[in-house]
Image (cartoon, rainbow, N blue to C red):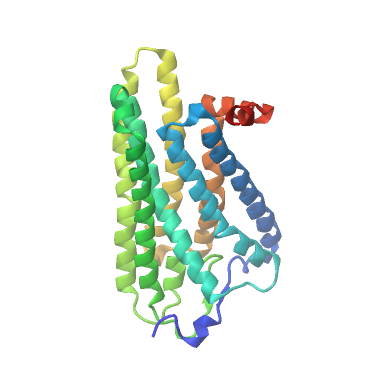
Amino acid sequence: MGWTNTSSLEGFILLGFSEHPQLESVLFIFVLFFYLLTLVGNFTIMILSYLESSLHTPMYFFLSNLSFLDLCFTTSLAPQTLVNLRGPEKTITYGGCVVQLYVSLALGSTECILLAVMALDRYVAVCKPLHYVVIMNPRVCQQLASLSWLSGLANSLIHATFTLQLPLCGNRKLDHFICEVPALLKLACVDTTVNELVLFIVSILFLIIPPTLILISYGFITQAVLRIKSVEARHKAFSTCSSHLTVVVIFYGTIIYMYLQPSDSYAQDQGKFISLFYTMVTPTLNPLIYTLRNKDVKEALKKLFSGKLCTLRT
């Protein structure tokens, strides 16, 4: 008998940061600040990519997908976290926990694939510039984006469902601030070796293969950029690619730390703060990194604030 037992249907107590009550008010402000920043930053990227015709390119199509993804990902976690940090009652309903698990797992997995797709786009743009328009045509871009979303959804459906089948035997105290797989496995009152093996295999597929492909593509990109004679063109190529690479390092670095270290060496307290960074800060960094280092986005922003962009669109 799995999660359908009476005890689990009552919901769960999210212990979160209750061991550090003095930090909760600070963490509340921290989460609220980054959540608002995420909303503003990612909405801005999506609006600019839609309104500014010069941004109607594969790169910004994928970036819009990334912004929408980050927006949904943080929204699936931040409101509940804020509620639990504010009040003494730190609970989540059974349904809320299930929805949070499925949604956050699907979106997190999708981002793993999407970042690899964005690296492929940069590889074609730098290494095959004459064939770029033909290779990365709108249909191919839509197919690659769909592949990313469907892969994330499939992983979530399989992995979360597998986790939800475990019997909990009345244990309702979840030692985390969100419903995530490693913390939920600790609640099970049966041997979770198979589940941990599945988690490890899935982690290899989503957390090792994509960044490996990204690094290989950037090896080819670096070679191609160094062959460019124009200093300005070389600088622009490096600037665009370094933005993507920064996002990749931050995203994969934190998530690999969370999911690929041995369970016996997993410091729960340390893991919570890493999770907080990955879930609240990383989605904020994506638009900042891309906008602050990108001339095209800066120009579109100027047009937006001056009112010219909306006028051009209408």
Question: Residue 309's quadrant in the figure?
Answer: top right
**113 over 18 or under it: above or below:** above
Q: Is residue 200 above or below residue 235?
A: below
Q: Is residue 290 left or right of residue 224?
A: right
Is residue 257 visible in the rendered image? The answer is no
Residue 247's spot in the image, x, y percent? 46, 40
Residue 23 spot, x, y in % from top left: 67, 60
Q: Is residue 210 visible?
A: yes
Query: What is the x, y in percent for residue 4?
Result: 45, 83
- Relative depth, front residue between 259 and 123: 123
Quadrant where the N terminus is found in the figure: bottom left
Q: Is residue 244 left or right of residue 277?
A: left
Question: With respect to residue 136, does 165 lie above or below?
Answer: below
Residue at 59% of width from left, 58% of height from top? Answer: 78
12 up-or-down from 214: above or below? below
**221 or 259: nearer the viewer:** 221
